[in-house]
Image (tube, rainbow, N blue to C red):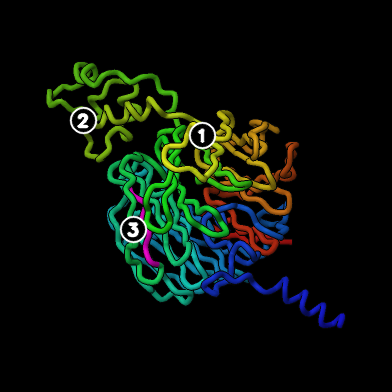
Amino acid sequence: MRTIGRSLLTLAFTMPLITGEGQPCAAGTTSQWPQFRGPGGSGVAIASDPPVVFGPSSNVLWRTPVPAGHSSPCIWDNRIFLTGFENNRLTTLCLDRLNGAILWRREVEPGLRERSSSLGHPAASTPATDGHAAYVYFGPYGLISYDFDGHENWKKPMTTPVTQHGAGTSPIVVDGRLLLNFDQDIGGYLLAVETSTGEAVWKADRSAYRRGFSTPLIWPPEKPELVIVPGTLRLTAYSLANGSERWSVSGLPNEMVTTPVTGGGLIFAAGWSHGAGVSKLPLFATLLEQGDRNGDGKLTREEAPAGPAKQHFLYIDADKDGQATREEWESIARVFEHSQNNLLAVRPDGRGEVTDTHVVWRQKRGLPYVPSPLYYEGRVYLVKNGGLASCFEAATGTVYYQEERLGALGDYYSSPVAANGRIYVASQPGVLVVYRAGEAFEVLARNPLGERLMATPAIVENKLYVRTEKHLYAFGE
């Protein structure tokens, strides 16, 4: 009987949880990190103990050269999916998680390259998987589905998003649907397609959301009903079934980069932008008097007077035709007027406009530009540029600490992830900081990797997978 009991106990802890479709449930196992920031986009690894100290010559299990890109590792069992860009080709890689060997590589030619800043990249979006296929999105191409052996299932070419920074969102998979947030300066939308065919199921209009790079969040995690997406000025929830809008909350900045998280029955969305707090913009007629040299009633960037018109010209010029019109100027003036930098804690059970009734608390200090918030063990963690960390009680917003120094300077584009009572976050110059989760701030290690680091780490089975500018690392003890 003891032998039978031990066998049953072993079986209970080694069998994957099964979903209604008969597939392993990623949130119940430790061998999957199936999308941006892992199971449910949480950034949390269950029952995993990655190393605290590591580097190019310390606790390295393997290191594989990979093409340049900002996407993060997507993991299912012993396969890692990653994207890159080299020799003017958009590349999808599948690696063996055990040794880092590249199992296959597939390439497509880009369409129109995104007009982006120096930090944008054609391979910025993290792949997603459901255990059947890998789904990748490239801004200059669209969506592609590959099976685990690298055979193409389907492809869905799409227009290149009209933004200043290129694409930043990542696709996610839920209940046989692939979801993609396609926010852009003109005509944005939220798209749901069948994972089996790539055919559109529904398309929700988001043309009012001028600027956004966030990955959608599914709620509730155990039985998804809503797709929650932040964007210009608002956090909005859509029905997973048909894309209809369920509720919205105002109080966000003009530009959203971070992805929301859920925990303790709340949704946490944090955003910061230069646009928030911009003083009231001058009248367009005044700008024309100062700069419209050819009298056509429009402004080029050269004609734009010094100040907001020149500083924010690429943002104002929505269609990117090199000219700012009265309509474009007045639209962005309204956006800047209502832009707010906030961390919002929202109850997700509302209907309609619920700012006054469903925002539980908010904070205005320590806000991130790119790194997404982290919910972990009843607390919310933020990391902002300069290496400043903050921690709040998730239920009430009580401040445990704010803007404590991680000791690694620079901008932060990687989002924090957590495992075994520790938080891992990387600076853009390439230092991965490990600090203790909890009410007291304590840095445990600063690990220089010697390369620029934009991607968010993945954690699977006591191992940390980190994509630097030139390599994919597996760290473990």
Image location of residue 404, percent across then percent down: 67, 32
Image location of residue 461, percent across then percent down: 68, 64
Distance from Cα at disc 2 to Cα at disc 3: 33 Å
Residue 297: image quadrant is top left
Q: Which residues are magenta?
A: 189-194
Image location of residue 380, percent across then percent down: 63, 41
Whether residue 376 is situated above or below residue 398 in the rendered picture: below
Q: Which residue is mark 1?
A: 357
Give, as a three-letter code, the residue at label 2.
Answer: Thr
- The residue closer to the viewer here, 373 or 63, is 373
153 vs 376, left or right, is left
Can the viewer see residue 227 in this picture?
yes
Verify whether residue 397 appears in magenta: no
Circle nearer the N terminus (1, 2): 2
Circle nearer the N terminus (2, 3): 3
Q: Quadrant of the N terminus?
A: bottom right
Q: Label 2: how many residues lie within 10 Å, few (<14), some (14-19) or many (20+)?
A: some
Distance from Cα at disc 1 to Cα at disc 3: 29 Å
Most common secondary structure along the magenta stretch: strand
